[in-house]
Image (cartoon, rainbow, N blue to C red):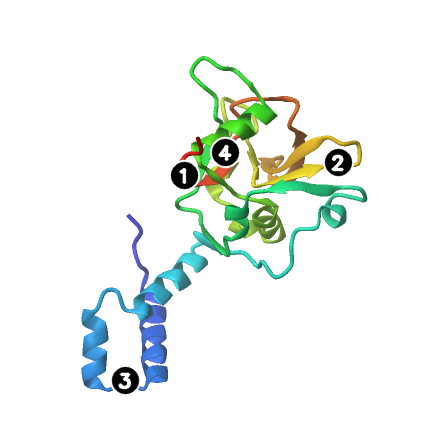
Amino acid sequence: MNIITIGQQFEMGKLVAEKLGAMKADGEEIQSIIESSDHPLWSDLVKHFSQKAGILVIVDRTTPFNPAEFIGSGWTIDEEDKRSLALTEVDFSKIRLETMLKKDEISINGEEKLKRLKKAGHICLNAKVFETLWNDKTLIPESWKKKTNDNTTYIFFDGTILRSPYGNRSVLSLDWSGGEWHWYYRWLDRAWYDYYPSAVCPQVSPQN
């Protein structure tokens, strides 16, 4: 259970007072707001403190991810998950890491893994979310530092499939090693193991 500190209580009270003041609410309106659990004021406060806790990450979609600028000349975007492109904020308390390995499978081809992700209906986080985390590494979940069976865990962002200058389809990832974060890309035509999971949002209706 997370305990609200005195400082957080003070900050919350201050924010509530500021917002109520901006509304110019009278006593009756204030009482109505207090009794209404679905009032926008409370959702705004939840969003505020979730951002501060590193749970909710805001994604700036005004500038798209540029692979040629980030990786190098000749890199392009081959395909993207449109549902992921629509995400302007990500609640990392709901993000899951999926390998798509079946029982007794040690590895899977990257293209097959991508097919399974799509069929399961997962919304894969894309390269813009990756870039947002890379630019502010304090936003990366602490749990992503954990190893998988003594192997460094590489968290992949399959919502964006890149194509290298040599024609290889690739996906970006983040990993924690040597006491710092690194980024990496892996070709989809290679073997993918249990320490190569994909970051996904809660699944929607599976594809046929």
Spot occupied by residue 207 in the image (x, y as percentages of width and height)? 44, 34
Q: Residue at x 49, y 32 (%)?
A: 117
Residue placed furthest toward the top: 104
Name the residue carrying label 3: 25
Is residue 66 in view from this perspective?
Answer: yes
Label at residue 118:
4
Spot occupied by residue 121 in the image (x, y as percentages of width and height)? 44, 36
Spot occupied by residue 194 in the image (x, y as percentages of width and height)? 51, 23
Would you place residue 35 above or below residue 140 in this image?
Answer: below
Q: Return the disc, 3 or 2, that comes first in the chain's sequence.
A: 3
Q: CA distance from mark 3 to mark 2?
A: 57 Å
Label at residue 203:
1
Q: CA distance from mark 4 to mark 2?
A: 22 Å
Q: CA distance from mark 3 to mark 4?
A: 48 Å
Q: Residue at x 52, y 34 (%)?
A: 198
Q: Return the disc, 1 or 4, that comes first in the chain's sequence.
A: 4
Label at residue 164:
2
Label 2 secondary element: loop
Check contact, mark 3 vs mark 4: CB within 8 A. Answer: no
Nearer to us in this view, 189 or 174: 189
Pair 1/4: label in front: 4
Q: CA distance from mark 3 to mark 1?
A: 41 Å
Would you place residue 46 above or below residue 20 in this image?
Answer: above
Q: Local crowd at mark 1 within 10 Å, few (<14), some, or many (≥20)?
A: some
Label 3 secondary element: loop
Q: Local crowd at mark 4 within 10 Å, few (<14), some, or many (≥20)?
A: some
Pair 3/2: label in front: 2
Give the position of the C terminus as an image quadrant: top left
Q: CA distance from mark 2 to mark 1?
A: 29 Å
Check contact, mark 3 vs mark 2: CB within 8 A. Answer: no
Say what amino acid the circle numbered 1 marks: Gln
Determine whether, in the image, residue 16 is placed left or right of residue 85. Answer: left
